[in-house]
Amino acid sequence: MAALKLFNILVLASVALLALESGPTSVNALATDRSHVARYAPASLSQQMVPPLRQALPLPLRLGLRQSAATSPYNSASSSSSSSTYVSLTPTTPTPTPTPTPTPAPTSSSSGKKWGLAWPNGDADYLSTFAARPNVGYLYTWSPYLPTDLYGLKGIPMLWGYDQVSDFQSLVVAGYANYVLGMNEPNEPSQSNMSPSDGVALWQQYINPLKDEGYYLVSPACTNDQTGLDWMASFFQECSGCHVDAVAFHFYGTDAQDFISYATQLYNTYKLPIWVTEFADQSFSGGAQATQDEVYAFASTVANFVDSTSWFEVAFPFGVMSDLQGVNTANSLLSSDDTPTSLAYDYFG
């Protein structure tokens, strides 16, 4: 009887062993192959590829490149094993072929067109409508990327900050463009956020050499406050041997005379042509925002100053987008039907 019990135990043990060998194998989650994660991310994470959003207060939200999948330079790709949409973390815009002979650097906005598009809309077809306005000659996108068709505009790549160095290096070569913009509000923690010394290092390594490739070099753009003035002063003091062709700034305020005074102060300090690469009639000090009529009056004064001032080269009003990111919507330059607003016509002709 004891021998029969022992035999049964051995049989049961053999069956269990066979089941373990033929059944599914448990794998530790940390050992799972995650190689696909490095190449793709859910579409909701595509903002990793663009400048960070500005905080709502005390400065305006600005994304620079929020785009639909149809217009983004970062092409979408679908996973064959899932219905989810993925966005490649590696930009697929081809690197342009440099021209054999660098184009001579421009010395000024000699075309007579002093207005530009701060353009977050990729290859949107309504770019042609804005590009056709008689005063518009320039476009930038808060990044090294430019729309496929510029419709005759001068495209201006930007080295926004640290996150864009790799893309900037691969794209911004001889023949890609004639102008380049420095860092976006480096004096602001919510923007490119770097010390003047770090700004000098980036400029010397990635932007200054472009002068020899035929580029017109426009400085980093700081905010219109004391921190902006201080940052720019330190940058120029420390940037020994740097070549800067023009000085850029951003302006948000409700008094057009303050705009004029600030631009004049920069010109008197550096004796270089002046660019404003973002501006709007916007208060961040509390209280009511400007009415539409007040915005029109602000625009008229600023436009007259820009157009009549020889040392003021280019101006980019903020607002050619459907979402103004916290800026007073009276500054909108894009209508709901993707045509210019009446304010846009005041600036762009």
Image: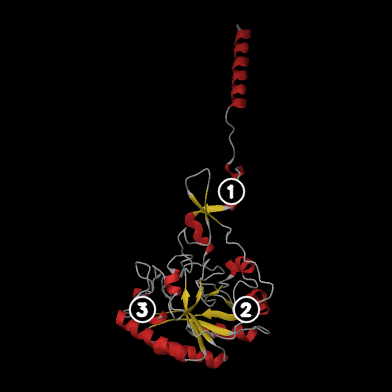
Mark 1, secondary structure of its residue: helix
Tell me which corner region of the image, top left, top right, bottom left or bottom right, holds residue 13.
Answer: top right
Q: Is 70 situated above or below 203?
A: above
The percent position of residue 317, horizontal first and vertical second, equals: 43, 78
Residue 95 makes an appearance in the image: yes
**Depth check, front residue: 212 or 184:** 212
Crowding around mark 1 (Cα neighbors within 10 Å: few <14, some 14 to 19, many 20+) is few
Which residue is the site of mark 2? 215
Which image quadrant: the C terminus? bottom left
Query: Does dot 2 land on a helix, a strand or a loop?
Result: loop
User: Mark 3 near mark 1, Cβ–Cβ under 8 Å?
Assistant: no
Residue type at mark 2: give it: Tyr
Q: Name the residue under label 3.
A: 343
Tell me the residue that label 1 is attached to: 36
Q: What residue type is labelled 1?
A: His
Labelled disc at residue 54: none
Quarter of the rendering occupied by the N terminus: top right
Q: Which residue lies furthest to the top in this view?
A: 1
